[in-house]
Amino acid sequence: MSTEEVLESSYDDKQAIMLDQMALEKVPAFLVYANKFPIAASVDLSCNLISEIPDSFFHKFPNLSALILNNNQLIRLPESISFLATLRTLKLDNNKLRTLPSTIGNLRKLEILTISSNKLISLPSTIGNLHATLCLLYTSDAADDMQCVDLGGRRIIKKKKK
């Protein structure tokens, strides 16, 4: 049995899929090509070497509430992230993101978004649609030059890198 098959059989009926600190260079195929994971509430792919999330990945998790992608090599997120309609927490710290997809504003239930230590040059205007967001945390070399983000009085922590 291959490593991929062992991983797949381990996560068939799990609420939490924990694949952090595994030196993965890409999202495992079973997460991309398998049937949906209807009961998965959280996916942790942090502390890996992943540079790209396939478009089809987000379609597999209709009830996902937490997605942890910190400490990878992500350069972009696909527009299909908007399929995560139940997402409440999205952690993207310590990647190489230069921008976020405009569809991130469709994540109406998102409460926590952390995007610190990326290469962000701008935030999409649709981020203002995140009315459920309680906290947006980001740092940037260009933080002082970034546009004002209005989250309807929600807490925004914007911190210039040292």
Image (cartoon, rainbow, N blue to C red):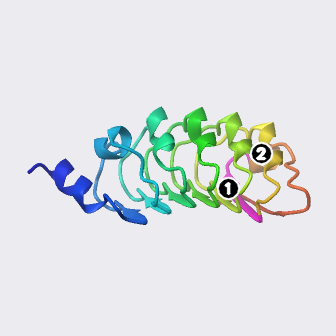
Q: Secondary structure at mark 1?
A: strand
Q: Earlier in the sequence, mark 2 or mark 1?
A: 2
Side (left or right) of 125 relative to 79: right
Discs 2/1, front = 2
Q: Residues within 10 Å of mark 1 (few under 14, many from 20)?
A: many
Amino acid carrying mark 1 in the image? Thr
The stretch drawn in magenta includes residue 66 = no
**Which numbered tag is attached to residue 98?**
none
Q: Secondary structure at mark 2?
A: helix
Q: Is residue 126 visible?
A: yes
Q: Residue furthest right?
A: 153
Side (left or right) of 17 relative to 66: left
Q: Quadrant of the C terminus?
A: bottom right
**Magenta part of the chain:** 134-142
Residue at image mark 2: 127
Which residue is located at x 28 percent, y 58 percent? 22
Q: Where does the image place residue 143, in percent across and percent down from the top left?
A: 75, 50
Amino acid carrying mark 2 in the image? Ile
Side (left or right) of 77 relative to 100: left
The stretch drawn in magenta includes residue 139 = yes
Which residue is located at x 51 percent, y 37 percent? 75
Q: Where does the image place residue 34, in percent across and percent down from the top left?
A: 33, 42
Side (left or right) of 29 relative to 129: left
Residue at image mark 1: 139
Most foreground residue, 120 or 107: 107
Which residue is located at x 18 percent, y 50 percent? 5
Q: Where does the image place residue 60, in percent across and percent down from the top left?
A: 45, 45
